[in-house]
Image (cartoon, rainbow, N blue to C red):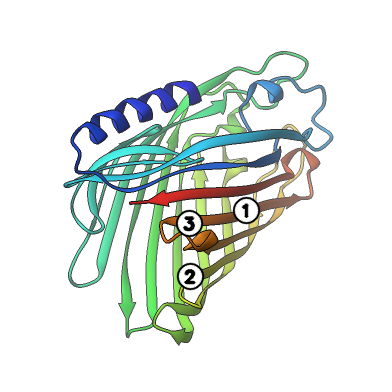
């Protein structure tokens, strides 16, 4: 998949450069990914021998091209998470095709916005299978986000809906198809200057699945901060803490799950890097930890990236 994505990006880049009217940036990102998750679908995680312990740790060194190219109303983006090509008629209004699916997003003069995405994602059809190669299949995902920014000049309200459909092979009470809802309310509490702020909010959500042991309710807190200083430095931080409550027992463990999730994203950006006005340096750290009373559901993901890009 990665090789095909890189080939597609290179082909599209050559087409855009041939037009001689391209703006944007090109760069390279390298780093390390560390994942411990029994539900992470990858070759090194296909076979497990027990349900009574945490997943094994998978470490990957990564290197990936960064693309952010524009030609008229068309754009081409590529990073570690996703590659996309799209048509944007105004800012924050676009239709696009990604390496995972396709989508549309729009924003309006009254500060309302929405996005709608259709994606495919690899999911184990029976993540509880032991001592055999676990089979994966493309799950179909529909994701909708809509909301309004700048309510009373300091509140942002967002609603997220996600539906997943997969023909899996687990016990009836663990079926993975279903949907989830989430409401996110953020309030800007600190405004250091025009481009620097601090915001805090809360998250309420639930999930309803064909397998009722996966049904949950959740509450959470979210904090965001961005600081720009000395004209060339930017630090951004996002911190989320969520508590999940499950009402039904999982039949593979004969107990209800009790889980807490902590996630952290930190980005540092330095423009005019090494005194070159077109050179931009990025450092990103991403961490996501799920603590559970059942070891099998515990997971941890850590990503550290260093990137260098040239803007033109």
Within-10-Å neighbours for mark 3: few <14, some 14–19, many 20+? many
| Residue bearing the label numbered 3 | 280
| Mark whose residue sits in front, 1 or 2 | 2
Judged from the image, the secondary structure of the residue bearing numbered disc 2 is loop
Check the image and report above or below for 205 versus 131. Answer: below
Q: Residue at x 56, y 61 (%)?
A: 267
Judged from the image, the secondary structure of the residue bearing numbered disc 3 is strand
Q: Position of residue 202 (x, y in %)?
A: 53, 71
Within-10-Å neighbours for mark 1: few <14, some 14–19, many 20+? some
Judged from the image, the secondary structure of the residue bearing numbered disc 1 is strand
Q: Are marks 2 and 3 in contact (CB under 8 Å)?
A: no
Where is residue 143, by image quadrant? top left
| Mark whose residue sits in front, 1 or 3 | 3
The numbered dot on residue 286 is 1
Q: Is residue 26 visible?
A: yes
Q: Is residue 121 left or right of residue 93?
A: right
Q: Is residue 183 left or right of residue 202?
A: left
The numbered dot on residue 232 is 2
Q: State which tag comes first along the sequence, 1 or 3.
A: 3
Check the image and report above or below for 298 versus 259. Answer: above
Q: Are marks 1 and 2 in contact (CB under 8 Å)?
A: no
């Amino acid at each position: 998949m990665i090789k095909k994505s890189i080939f597609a990006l290179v082909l599209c880049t050559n087409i855009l450069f041939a037009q001689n009217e391209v703006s944007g940036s090109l760069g390279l990102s390298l780093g390390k990914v560390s994942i411990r998750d029994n539900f992470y679908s990858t070759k090194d995680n296909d076979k497990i021998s027990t349900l009574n312990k945490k997943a094994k740790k998978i470490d990957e060194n990564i290197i990936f091209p960064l693309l952010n190219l524009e030609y008229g109303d068309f754009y081409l983006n590529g990073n570690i998470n996703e590659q996309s090509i799209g048509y944007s008629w105004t800012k924050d209004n676009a239709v696009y095709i990604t390496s995972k699916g396709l989508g549309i997003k729009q924003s309006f003069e009254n500060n309302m916005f929405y996005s709608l995405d259709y994606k495919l994602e690899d999911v184990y059809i029976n993540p509880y299978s032991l001592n055999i190669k676990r089979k994966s299949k493309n799950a179909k995902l529909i994701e909708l986000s809509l909301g309004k920014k700048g309510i009373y000049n300091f509140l942002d309200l967002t609603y997220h809906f996600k539906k997943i459909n997969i023909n899996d092979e687990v016990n009836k009470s663990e079926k993975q198809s279903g949907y989830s809802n989430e409401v996110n309310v953020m309030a800007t509490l600190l405004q250091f200057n025009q481009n620097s702020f601090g915001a805090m909010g809360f998250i309420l959500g639930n999930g309803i699945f064909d397998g009722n042991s996966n049904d949950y309710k959740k509450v959470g807190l979210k904090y965001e901060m961005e600081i720009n200083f000395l004209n060339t430095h930017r630090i951004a931080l996002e911190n989320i803490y969520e508590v999940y409550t499950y009402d039904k027992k999982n039949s593979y463990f004969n107990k209800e799950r009790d889980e807490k999730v902590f996630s952290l994203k930190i980005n540092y950006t330095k423009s005019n890097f090494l005194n070159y006005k077109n050179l931009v340096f990025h450092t990103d750290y991403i961490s996501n930890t799920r603590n559970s009373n059942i070891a099998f559901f515990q997971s941890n993901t850590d990503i550290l990236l260093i990137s260098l890009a040239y803007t033109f």
